[in-house]
Amino acid sequence: MGEAYLDFEAGKSVILADFRRNPAELEKILASIRQIADDPDVGINRIEITGYASPEGSWRTNETLSRNRASALKEFIRRQFPIADNLFAVGVVAEDWETLRRIVEENSGVNHPVLSATEQARILTIIDSEEAPDRKEARLRALGSTWQTLLTGYFPPLRRVKYQITYTVKDYSTEPIGVLLEKEPEQLNAYELFRVAEQYPRDSEEWHQKMEQTVKLHPESVEANINAAASYLVQGEPDKAREYLDKVGDDPRASNNWGAYYLMTGDAGKAETYFRNVISADPDGALNNLMEVEKVKEDQERQRTRGRREAK
């Protein structure tokens, strides 16, 4: 989903690829589609394009102009990609009074001139009236210099197209995933690799191997690093687990693993802090872990007491 601010010659709907901001705006749209169209595992279901216009001019004229400009973008896209006509839907917002009202009410001065309180109140009163759009425009024009401020400082961003691309990513069943895992594992995302791993018991060698393979193929995936850390914690290798935990830092999803790491390395205080962080998400698991923390604390206190006695 995105928006593009295409520049058209006054009263025209032909897209000029090298006109004003159009090169950058058109490339933004094409890059969005290219990312999907070039992926063999992705199928485009629908591309919705909606044209928007500002309130100057008659409502009927603006409706036609917005529709023609949205249709022009549709045809521009079709010249770049072999996308069937029936996958497109063209909509129109003849005059975008809703957005105009929002930016006038905000009156932030960011990308727009600041309106006086009186100007702002008058504009909002007109916009909120039950009058027809053309009558509202006539009343705004009657505001003189305020109209000029709207015309040059508020209307241009209203002239735009909004596009939304709906697509489906191919979902592999477990069997084809297994085939790809042997031949082209780099084609699988982290989620698909997790599905393969879940076929094996969590303390099995196969499960550990799949967790290691996943994090190697997707080293930037937070989930892959968290699961790799969990794998090494289960194997009793906290130092290896720490390498992956350091990559995710204080991500809340890693709290349970951090707790297990500190419990395993003897820092019951830090372990308790992390386990308490996940009480709301996993109350039963967190409480069980906190009971283990208490046992460790009791053992550590007994050892300290024994040490003090021996010292005497």
Image (spheres, rainbow, N blue to C red):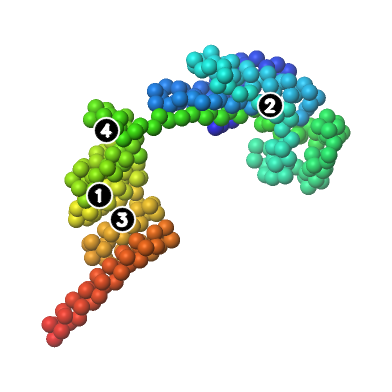
Q: Nearer the viewer, mark 4 or mark 3?
A: 4
Q: Is residue 65 visible?
A: yes
Q: Which residue is mark 4?
A: 178
Cα separation between marks 4 and 3: 28 Å
Secondary structure at badge 1 equals loop
Q: Residues within 10 Å of mark 3 (few under 14, many from 20)?
A: many
Amino acid identity at mark 3: Asn
Q: Which residue is mark 3?
A: 257
Q: Which residue is mark 1?
A: 202
Q: Is residue 92 above or below residue 174?
A: above
Question: Closer to the N terminus: mark 2 or mark 3?
Answer: 2
Q: Nearer the viewer, mark 1 or mark 3?
A: 1
Residue for point 55% across, 21% down: 87
Cα separation between marks 2 and 1: 54 Å
Q: Which residue is mark 2?
A: 92
**Image quarter of residue 109:** top right
Q: Residues within 10 Å of mark 1 (few under 14, many from 20)?
A: some
Circles 4, 1 touching at the beta carbon (< 8 Å): no
Q: Nearer the viewer, residue 191 or 32?
A: 191
Secondary structure at badge 2 equals strand
Cα separation between marks 2 and 3: 51 Å
Question: Closer to the N terminus: mark 4 or mark 1?
Answer: 4
Where residue 188 appears, as percent x and y from the top left, is: 32, 32
Q: Is residue 24 above or below residue 149?
A: above
Q: Nearer the viewer, mark 2 or mark 1?
A: 1
**Image quarter of residue 164:** top right
Amino acid identity at mark 1: Arg
